[in-house]
Amino acid sequence: MNLTRIVGAAAVAALSLSSLALSATGAEAKGGSVRVRAAGACTASTDWKLKTKKDDGRLEVEFEVDANRRGQVWTVTLADNGTTFWSGRRTTHGRSGSFEVEKRTANRVGSDTITARATNAKTGETCSGSLVYPG
């Protein structure tokens, strides 16, 4: 195999692996606070996004599930450092067939590991993700 084919094959493999990886990024939000985001794919065809930023001394957490299908019922749980701070049900709606949960939790000393999990009540499909908000 020549060098061009080897380099090309390596590039394709790297792109394939990067598309499977979850992305978690930090960026400056208004007022100089840090905003951390993560996104990924669920166990079937649905996608999720998780965002966290500081808001009045607490952490604002947004979790969005985009199923592209209206009327699906999902059970959702949000946790901070392993402790559930919200759980409930949401139904996909609108043209996008998505739902969003926006809740606040305490900004604990040190880093906060925020986790989100949603399970489709009918199909069992699961969306789960996490991010670390720096201390």
Image (cartoon, rainbow, N blue to C red):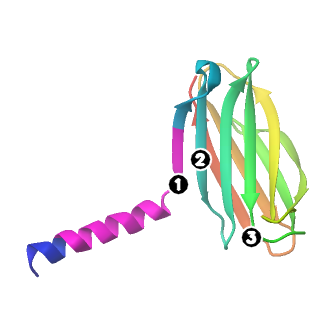
Residue extending furthest toward the front: 95
Crowd around label 2: few <14 · some 14–19 · many ≥20 (10 Å): some
Q: What residue type is disc 2 on? A: Ala
Q: Which residue is mark 3?
A: 125
Residue 22 numbered mark, or none: 1
* Distance from the alpha carbon under mark 2 to that under mark 3: 19 Å
Residue that appears at 81% across and 75% down: 123
Instruction: Please state the horizontal and vertical placement of residue 102, each as a whole percent of the image.
Output: 81, 40
Q: Quadrant of residue 97?
A: bottom right
User: Which residue is nearer to you in this view: 32 or 52?
Assistant: 32
Q: Could you tell me which secondary element the residue under label 3 belongs to?
A: loop
Sequence-wise, the earlier of marks 2 and 1 is 1
Q: Which residue is mark 2?
A: 38
Q: What residue type is disc 3 on? A: Glu
Sequence-wise, the earlier of marks 3 and 1 is 1
Whether pointer 2 and pointer 1 mark residues with C-beta atoms closer than 8 Å, the reply is: yes
* Distance from the alpha carbon under mark 3 to that under mark 1: 18 Å
Q: Which residues are magenta?
A: 7-25
Q: Quadrant of residue 40?
A: bottom right
What secondary structure is the stretch in magenta mostly built from?
Answer: helix
Sequence-wise, the earlier of marks 2 and 3 is 2
